Image (cartoon, rainbow, N blue to C red):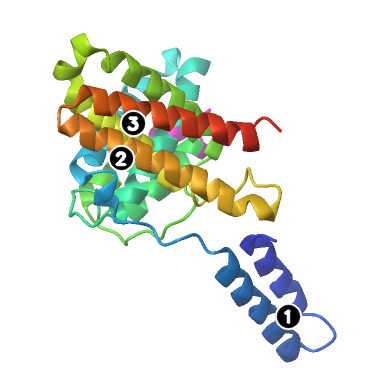
Amino acid sequence: MRVGATLMLSKRWAISATGPTVVLSGALFLLAAHRSAAAPPESPKASSYAPAADLAAQVDFYLNRLSESLANQAEYDGAKQSRVHKDASTVAALVLVLGRHDEPNKYQSAAASMIQAAQALVEGGEDFGKARSALDALNQAAASGKGDAPAWADVAPLGALMKQVPIVNNSLRRSLEPSRFKKLSAQVAQQAATLAAIAQASLFDESMVSDAADTDKWRQFCAQMRDAAGAMNSAAHAGDQAATAAAQKRLTQSCDACHAVFRDK
């Protein structure tokens, strides 16, 4: 049973005819037990898999691309709507990690309000007016530097994040060619940080887990993807093309193994 379902159950029990005080206590006991059994593992320091500077640079990249996608209503077609959906979801994942980061960064204080605005953009992305307003709110939140630190949570549609992964990964593959890597190593590091952030954010979304017994397996796959992307980031910063390519291969293998369990059933 998911935590959300348990919360709903506790509310129903709280107003049952058998007595609100006694039954509510029992429901809260079950909720506490469920959280204890199913709580995600403690997250490692974000700097261990994605430097704050790389994540912030990627937020800037996606904010700019969102502005490009929403520059002209007459040109806001299905392809751009789809890109906005993925990019706004990615911003939410990036900012989640930045908000919880152990390294100070320019988006840390504004993270919670940025996530809320990014979610509004995801929700209203098919309507140009709503999307444009949400983007304006997102940019205003980013510039304000004000807000609360977010909690680790499911912040974006898993499907949108998973569609972004191959787009980023294909760009990484091209950049890992020996003739291009030296020039593009900084970009490789930043894109690897994006994949690490997506994996970390996905760890808190169990929508693909139909059997509670597979919850730990899902979390392990997310952690493997995050750590492989983190290894790519570190190797790219070190200028080691071979180590970066090896880590990218591990990341792809992790994704394929996860798909075999959770997507291809």
Q: Which residue is mark 3?
A: 247
Q: Position of residue 104 (x, y in %)?
A: 17, 54
Instruction: Using the image, determine if residue 26 lies above or below residue 186.
Output: below
Q: Which residue is mark 2?
A: 230
As measured in the structure, the alpha-carbon distance from the residue carrying label 2 to the one carrying label 3 is 9 Å
Q: Which residue is mark 1?
A: 14
User: At 29% from the left edge and 59% from the top edge, which residue is drawn?
Assistant: 147
Between disc 2 and disc 1, whose residue precedes? 1
Give the position of the C terminus as an image quadrant. Answer: top right
Between disc 1 and disc 3, whose residue precedes? 1
In this view, the mark in front (2 or 3): 3
Is disc 3 surrounded by few (<14), some (14 to 19) or many (20+) residues within 10 Å?
Answer: many
Is disc 1 surrounded by few (<14), some (14 to 19) or many (20+) residues within 10 Å?
Answer: many
Q: Secondary structure at mark 1?
A: helix
Q: Give the residues in magenta.
A: 123-132
Q: Position of residue 20 (x, y in %)?
A: 75, 87
In this rendering, the count of numbered labels is 3
* Magenta-span inclusion, residue 93: no
Q: Position of residue 65 (x, y in %)?
A: 32, 24
Which image quadrant is residue 170 in? top left
Q: Position of residue 78 (x, y in %)?
A: 52, 17
Instruction: Return the residue nearer the eye: 54 or 253.
Output: 253
